[in-house]
Image (cartoon, rainbow, N blue to C red):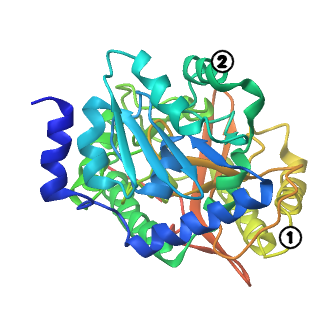
Amino acid sequence: MDYQHYRTALSGTLAQSELPFAPDEYQMRLNKVRHAMALRGLDALLLTDPADINYLSGYHTFEVSVHACLVCTQARLVLQVASIETGAAVVTARVDEIIGYCWENLDEIITPLADLLSPCSKIGIDGWSSGLRFGVIDTLMQTIGRERFSEAGAVVDAIRLIKSPAELEMLQQSARITALGLETAIQSIRPGVTDNDIAAVGAKALLENGSEFMSLQPIVTSGHRIGVIHVNHKRRVIQPNEPVFLEFGSAYQRYTAPMMRTAVTGAPSPALSATRDLCRSLFETLCDAMRPGNTFDAAAQAADALLAPQRDQYFFSGVFGYAVGAQFPPSWVEGTGFIAKGQARTFETNMVFHLPLCLRVPGQWGVGISDTVVVTENGAKPLTNNDWQLFEARS
């Protein structure tokens, strides 16, 4: 059968059977987005980020490399996906209509979109979206008029940034699984095993305890490689008396609560212990500053002042926290908010951030310890359960 008949067959038996939340949750989100659209005078939103599409419709698939979009107007919610993804759309999405296109024939994308959007004079897009393809948007603009389109990425971002009670439950489930994976992995560390061995043990534990495919695979590095940000396990043998860095994040209904831990194959050196202490102080300073009404900038400035006396010793990215929620590969970073200097947005209750406090001495070593936290009236509280110790792994 062709994909149209495939979709029809599934609709009769499995429609919305894997919708991650109750319909009321999606209606609440949709109402908020439509209200924000009305305030901006937008007739339509054209969403292309897989996470934005998931947020409003529930649609999810591991194949996020092909074009997909969601058209949101005051009256309708229409999902366009490749022919091979129509099954996932039927099973996981709550929308008014699903439009397929043959994934080997990209010309089929434009005409249905142009027909949908031609009645709309003001169309919002997210120009920074990971799913926005120049070939699609440029051709669409040529077809119905470039003047209709404007930047509107902040519309959905501002709503996604504040988590609902149902979302917090998903993040708590992820936090539980993440902790189990990290604990299993860290207990396997000893001189003579490889970073791949440790990652494999952790990945197995994450999957056995309920993680879906992860937005970012388990990260394990050791020794001098910790001093290089964003490298990963590469068959390196763990040596005696060296640090081992781990960063895991399970996915539960696409929601990820990441956590970092650091182990040492032996007793921690004074330098490693002092760095751990600084990471903990940064964490406490941030959590105290993360109160409703305070700005992201103010929290970052407070932490940065603590780091300043040792800035020349360590590399640090400058981002003390980033929002997390439901995401897709290649990253669990939500992209809706960053705790960094110059960020004027204010904290609100139920915003959720990962605080990636990893301090690296280039070419030598590093220490990373972190929690995912939720903003409350009294400051940020951990969702993950890090003990904030350097784990001593002995043979």
Query: Of the numbered discs in the image, which one, if any, rests on residue 142?
Result: 2
Check disc 2 and give the amino acid type. Gln
Q: Is residue 80 visible?
A: yes
Quarter holding residue 350: bottom right
Q: Is residue 249 above or below residue 120?
A: below
Q: In the structure shown, which secondary structural element does the residue marked by tag 2 occupy?
A: helix
- The residue where tag 1 is placed is 294
Residue 268 image point, x, y percent: 56, 52
The answer, for residue 258, to whether it is visible in the render is: no
Residue at left 70%, top 56%?
A: 37
Quarter of the picture holding the N terminus: top left
Q: Identify the residue at horizontal 49%, vertical 60% (top origin).
A: 257
In the image, is 92 to the left or to the right of 30? left
Q: Position of residue 69 (x, y in %)?
A: 49, 38
Judge by depth and name the residue closer to the eye, 359 or 214: 214
Front in this rendered view, residue 292 or 357: 292
On screen, residue 286 above or below 315: below
In this view, the residue farthest toward the left is: 1
Task: Specify the label residue 64 is tagged with.
Answer: none
Dot placed on the residue nearer the N-terminal end, 1 or 2: 2
Name the spot of residue 234 as percent of width and height, x first. Answer: 39, 25
Hey, which quadrant is residue 347 in on the image? bottom right
Kindly state the secondary structure of the residue where label 1 is placed: loop
**Between 215 and 371, which is closer to the camera in this rendering?**
215
User: Looking at the image, is 126 positioned above or below residue 275?
Assistant: above
- Image coords of residue 305 (percent x, y): 90, 56
Which residue appears at 12% of the width and 47% of the height?
Answer: 9
Residue at the extreme bottom of the image, as rendered: 378
Instruction: Answer few, some or many: residues within 10 Å of disc 2's Cα (few below 14, many 20 plus, some between 14 and 19).
Output: few
Residue found 87% across the figure and 50% down from its top: 341
